[in-house]
Image (cartoon, rainbow, N blue to C red):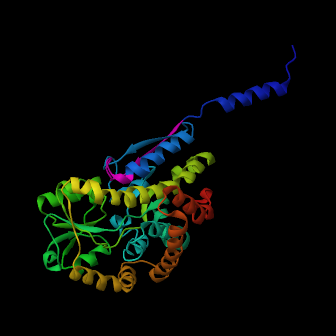
Amino acid sequence: MFIDRKIILGVLAACAIAAPVSAKELIFGTGSGAKSKINIDAIVPFLKITEKQSNGSLTWKYLPGNQIVTVRSALKGLRDGLIDAGMVIPVFARKDMINNNILYDTIHLGHDDPVAAGGAAHETIMLNCPNCVAEYKKFNAFLLSSFAGGSNIMVCRKPVKTVADIKGLKVRGGGASNRLVKALGGVPVGLPPQELALALERGGLDCSVQALNWMLSFGIHDIAKHVIDYPMGSSRGLGLIAMNRKTWKSLTKQQRKILWDNAPLASARAVVDSYVNFDNVYRKNIGPKKGVKFYQAGADIKGAIAKMMAKEEAAIVAVIKKQGAKNPAKVLAAFKANLAKWRKFSRSEIKGNADAFGRVLKREIYDKLDPEKM
């Protein structure tokens, strides 16, 4: 019996298409705990949607809360292949990421608009700061998605309302926040958010300059319930999802596209849902129910912060250049220009909507990069 060779080849091709692709399991590790808003709102949805869109060819092993890496060891974990992706906070790897910390230290710029600060910082890192990209590359990694925090406040174990009250207190800072703490008369202490609750409970720390959502994410409102509700800068240029380069190259082109296409929305959700929207809910509802008291800053606190902020640009360039950053003035200028542009996007297009923010991130950053060359 004669069987057409074309028919046989067609049947074999159809079988190959229908055959399930063996799943590739990737490890996502972070020092941030499972209850962290950033994980709940941005990371977990990203992992789930990429699994779904890959039809099972990609799966994730999600290891939050220091199970495999901490906030201090995440970068080395990426380099050593302990994790395929993870959260990298530059201030906790300052020596190795001093150029990325140029952006982290711009706490005085755009802290009233986390959306604009987040978009501008990510654009600056990816398109205007080759040394920032090189720092990730040195650790066999690249930045897939970033985020910015909301406006920092100061939370304390006891009521603190004046500069005199702050004088001599041990206050958690970090990066440029250390200068702010000193300007208010406090003694800066560097601690990751995961260690704050215990330090506050045991008296090793009196106050913390931090994002408001840390009150819930890290259980701080169970210990410290007094908040000076005045903007004290904000974090930006934070690595929400940093990828191991070797892992990235081992994926199929379609798998890489799925991760790339979902990265902008992950960034957007981290900023809008985990910070901006949550902060509003916390102030009105969650905080008061937990007994958290909010205090308005007096003229002395406002004055000390304004005086410090006025000197920040010169301080950033001088301090971080001495610490090894290259061309900090050029990077700072690029960030300021990007911030002005992103402020317009924030007001005219994004308007506090995460989906809209994701679309603008895609257009302004991701569409200008080739995921095949990361």
Residue 173, how many percent across, how many down? Answer: 26, 70
Residue 76, how many percent across, how many down? Answer: 39, 57
Residue visible at 28% across and 65% down? 210
Q: Nearer the viewer, residue 40 or 227?
A: 227
**In the image, is residue 139 above or below residue 302?**
above
Residue 371, how many percent across, how many down? Answer: 60, 57
Q: Is residue 254 left or right of residue 174?
A: right
Q: Is residue 334 left or right of residue 215?
A: right
Residue visible at 52% across and 44% down? 50
Q: Nearer the viewer, residue 178 or 242?
A: 178
The C terminus lies in quadrant: bottom right
Residue visible at 62% across and 56% down? 372
Q: Residue furthest top?
A: 1
Q: Is residue 49 visible?
A: yes
The stretch of residues the image draws in magenta is: 23-38
**Residue 26 within the segment the image draws in magenta:** yes
**In the image, is residue 306 above or below residue 221?**
below
